[in-house]
Image (cartoon, grey):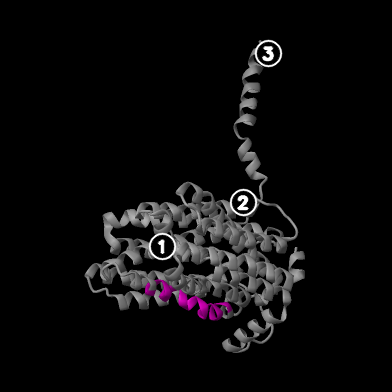
Amino acid sequence: MAQTTARPSAVLEALRTAKYPLLESFKRSPIYETLQVRDFRWIWVGSFASFMAMNMQMITRGWLVLRLEDDSPFALTLVMVSFAAPMTFMSLIGGALADRVPKKYLIFGSQIGNALLTFLMAMMDASGTIWLGAVLAIGFVNGSMMAINMPSRQSIISEIVPDDKLMNAVALNNSAMNLTRIIGPALAGFLIIFIDTSGVFYLVSIVYVISAFSVLRLNVTSVPGNGKKKSLTGDIQEGLKYVWSDATLRGLVIMAFIPSLFGFTLFALLPAWGREALNVRSTDLGILMMLMGIGALVGTLGLASVKKFNRRGALLLVNSTLWGLALMALSQSPSYVIATPFLLLIGLLSSVYMSLNMTLTQLYAAPEMRGRVMSIAMMTFGLMPIGALPFGSLAEVIGTPNALTLSGLVLAVATVVFAFAYPHFRKMV
């Protein structure tokens, strides 16, 4: 009888150990360890909400402009540039402020600013008083708020997680952005059918508020700087000199600019390439964008799962070279089936590259300079559409597939040239 009563407990124990091996494995992973940091969990929630709002807003704003300007592609380009252009210069101000003011208050203020601007656009849209000039002006200020937000949002991570978890934390934080790239545009497109563009703008403003208040949960309020502060202009100049005088940081910034100019051309020219190379429809175009988002999400989650490895500088160089080669292969793909793995690969390579570059930039920058150093790296986001302009013009002459092939070739060659010009970069740990 004793043996009979013992059997159920033995069976239950066997079931318990067999049922949750994945959970036990996850608890030993760097992702789980990173999420145990309370402040980082709030940063992740805030990043997810912020990027969700931004991606939903971009799609909704584009749809609104198409309606206002009779499907004008030039108007769409103007809207994209109005948002991206401030990133090339306002981020320097955002970085200087991040080294003078507690970062969480800068993030909070910029998110509240975006919420108010989006709410204003929603009211103008609902009342029928919106016009292209207003969309451009609001987009410019939205981009300026983002330029203030991003250096603080990225550099604050190094203040709340230890250095040995920084790569995992940066990658995991970027996974929030990549996840919203997949679901944000689709959700916005679906909601426009039921609540119109104005309703989506109202919803986006609420999401921005959620992002803003999540950052107030952080315990970090100190400013890592020391000594007497210069003027804001002096701080910016000091940051530029600091980066230029440090060979490692200078190399990291250069290797942030190269892919922005030659690798991200695909993001701007994807619709034209899809029409010319694959003859895709609008629904197919959405799938192409989603495939890159899935690859990017896999890449950031994969990097967040790695405990530690050396020679990260060499990995950056290999990654960038493969990115260029993958772009060349994709641009000449004759069918949807052949293009799919290259789209996934480019999404993966680009996300790993950006996460790793941001990690090393923070690790090699002094704590009191991290905001300004990150702001210089953040300027690359504003250069993405600008870098696509010459290749877009070239595509008019030689075709989009050939223009993208040239873009990928320049990316690969520029990376190899950099590797020989900065030999110590290959040994960076």
Residue for badge 2: 302
Where does the magenta region start and end? 78-95
* Contact? badges 3 and 1 (CB < 8 Å): no
Residue 96 lies within the magenta run: no
**Residue 191 screen position, x and y as percent:** 32, 55
Quadrant position of residue 325:
bottom right
* Contact? badges 2 and 3 (CB < 8 Å): no
Amino acid on which disc 1 is placed: Ala
**Residue 395 screen position, x and y as percent:** 45, 68
Q: CA distance from mark 2 to mark 3?
A: 47 Å
Quick one: label 2 or label 3, which is nearer the N terminus?
A: 3
Report the predominant secondary structure element of the magenta stretch.
helix
Residue furthest top as drawn: 1
Q: How many marks?
A: 3
Residue for badge 3: 3
**Residue 337 screen position, x and y as percent:** 48, 46
Out of 274 and 18, give the one closest to the viewer. 274
Quick one: label 3 or label 1, which is nearer the N terminus?
A: 3
Amino acid on which disc 2 is placed: Gly
Q: Residue at x 68, y 76 (%)?
A: 250
Residue 80 lies within the magenta run: yes
**Residue 40 screen position, x and y as percent:** 59, 59
Q: CA distance from mark 2 to mark 1?
A: 31 Å
Residue for badge 1: 272
The quarter of the picture where the C terminus appears is bottom right
Amino acid on which disc 3 is placed: Gln
Quadrant position of residue 78:
bottom left
Residue furthest left as drawn: 128
